[in-house]
Image (tube, rainbow, N blue to C red):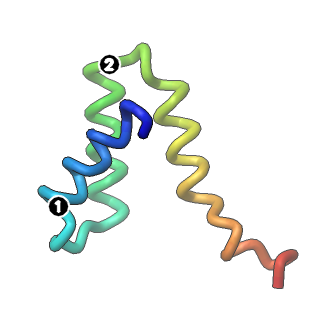
Amino acid sequence: MYFTDRGIEELEDRRGGEQLSVEWLAARLRAFVDEHPEFEDAVERLATYLARDDADDPEDL
C-alpha cells in the first residue's frame, strides 16, 4: 500500500456516494495548487492523466 492510498480511501469514504462535476474537480485542484504551489507539477500530471483517458483515444478503436 502506498502512502497516498490513505488519502484516496478517505476521498472514497467521504465522497464515494456523491456525483461530482469535472468543473468542481478542476476548481478544487486549482485551489490546492494555489495553497501548495510546490505540488503544481504533480497536480498537472494528474489532471493530464485524467483528461487523456486511453479509452477516449480514437487510435485504440
Question: Extreme front residue here?
Answer: 1
Q: Nearer the viewer, residue 29 or 17?
A: 17
The reply, left or right, for residue 31 in relation to residue 52 is left
Quarter of the image for residue 51 reads bottom right
- Between discs 2 and 1, the one toward the N terminus: 1
Residue at 26% across, 57% down:
24
Q: Nearer the viewer, residue 56 or 11?
A: 11
**Most foreground residue, 44 or 18:** 18
SS for callout 2: loop
Q: Closer to the observer: label 2 or label 1?
A: 1
**36 relative to 53 in the view: left or right:** left
Q: Decide: is 17 above or below 27.
A: below
Q: What residue type is labelled 2?
A: His
Q: Which mark is residue 36?
A: 2
- Mark 2 burial class by Cα count in 10 Å: few <14, some 14-19, many 20+: few
Q: In which quarter of the image is the N terminus?
A: top left
Q: Mark 1 points at which residue?
A: 15
Name the residue rendered at 34%, 40% in the picture. 29
Q: In this view, does 44 lie above or below 51?
A: above
